[in-house]
Amino acid sequence: MTAVSRYTAEFGFELRTCWWAEREWPPEETTESTVFVARQLGTGRRRWDTIVLECDPDALRQRATFGPDRLDGDLLHVVRNAPAEWTYYRDALPDPGYPWRYVRESIHRADDRGILETHKEGNRIQIRRKWPYPDWLERIVAIENKPDLDRSAARRLGTQLEYDVAIGLADEVWVATRTTGESVEPVLLEDLPVEAGVLAFDPETLETEVAWYPRTLAVEEPGTRILERPDGGSRDGSAARFEYVDPEWKAERRLAIAERAYERGWRSFADTMRPDCRHFQLREQDGQLLPYCGAKDHQPTARECSGDCPDYEPEPPAWRTKGWPIEGGPGKRFKKLLADRRRRRRPGLDSTSG
Ligand code: SF4
């Protein structure tokens, strides 16, 4: 497979973007922030291909005391509001807006995870925080990967990016497209919102060039969620429908996305592929571990390498018993290798977590 065709599929291109961003972000600048990268995260309506999180280095290290798994919204409600002194939980926590019995469940979950202290006085649950939850997230950058940015791809992407710009959930949005040796045509830029950055990226050499710089979006101000828009036909006189989203909702969503990104990173691709197939391999390219299929003799896409792949063959049982340092055979070992690398990007997590 040639260097160009290897990354024609968005999946392969995306993995290279993630690898590059993890090491080089931000393009053409330096940063004091700690950067880590995740993929395929967002909200119910909109999922971004690659997300880059710029984090306060000390606060990110403190975040590690809460463990490698994400804190969902209910756990965040508890640990962020837990007091420094023993307090009856209903006096300590703001009214959640849903029944208190769910809060009690979250308190028990937090206790089980060792991130909250609890005890009972009579039948009243008292809580006390172990550590303050740190303010670790500085910025979220969303990148859409479009190796072949032609006119129709730019139009489709333009609509999605307009949604991102209007809602202002990410601090910046970008399009990454494959370097072609020519400058990105101005006509393509016209189809993208002016607030979105455009990055020309060579997935082989990892060289980048900024074709258009993005504008910082107003994440702390109310946003607009575009619900429906006219299809643009000549007879279409309908109006767009939209609703406002308040800054508190945005702040909560941003933290929820960041927590999921912290847990998953971008190397979780093996979780949705078939590393337990005898043909699955990880091949290294300039330090990056990329999936490879020995049966198809190319890098499979996530869709190809799935439960209904006709070439799937389970690992022979013998692989799982002898000769593999990790119980469970090479499939498990691949996942462990990727998890180890993810953990290295999360300062403060010890070597047994994750
Ligand atoms: S044969 Fe199919 S399931 Fe097995 S590694 Fe290749 S693509 Fe994945």
Image (cartoon, rainbow, N blue to C red):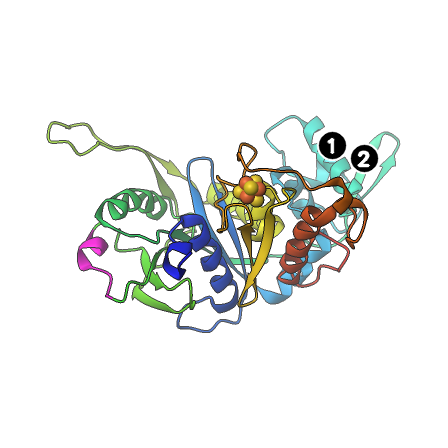
Mark 2 and mark 1 residues within 8 Å of each other at the beta carbon: yes
Task: Tell me which amino acid carries mark 1.
Answer: Arg
Q: In the image as oriented, which residue stretches furthest toward the left?
A: 234
| Ligand 1 lies in quarter | top right
Look at the numbered disc 2 and give the secondary structure of its residue.
strand
Q: Is 158 positioned to the left or the right of 301 in the image?
A: left
Q: Nearer the viewer, residue 133 or 123?
A: 133
Determine whether, in the image, residue 37 is placed left or right of residue 236.
right
At a point 52% along the width and 63% down the height, the residue shown is 22
In the rendered image, residue 210, in percent from the top left (x then y), is placed at: 32, 66
The residue under the point 64% across, 60% down is 341
Q: Nearer the viewer, residue 89 or 39?
A: 39
- Dividing the picture into quarters, in which one does residue 75 lie? top right
Q: In this view of the protein, can residue 172 be seen by the observer?
A: no
- The front one of 104 and 16 is 16
Tell me which amino acid carries mark 2: Ile
Residue beneath disc 1: 104
Q: Position of residue 176 (x, y in %)?
A: 36, 57
Q: In which quadrant is the N terminus drawn?
A: bottom left
Residue located at (77% from left, 53% from top): 324
| Residue that numbered label 2 is attached to | 125
Question: Over which residues does the magenta segment extend?
Answer: 182-190
Cα distance in 3D space between marks 2 and 1: 8 Å
On screen, residue 146 above or below 126: below
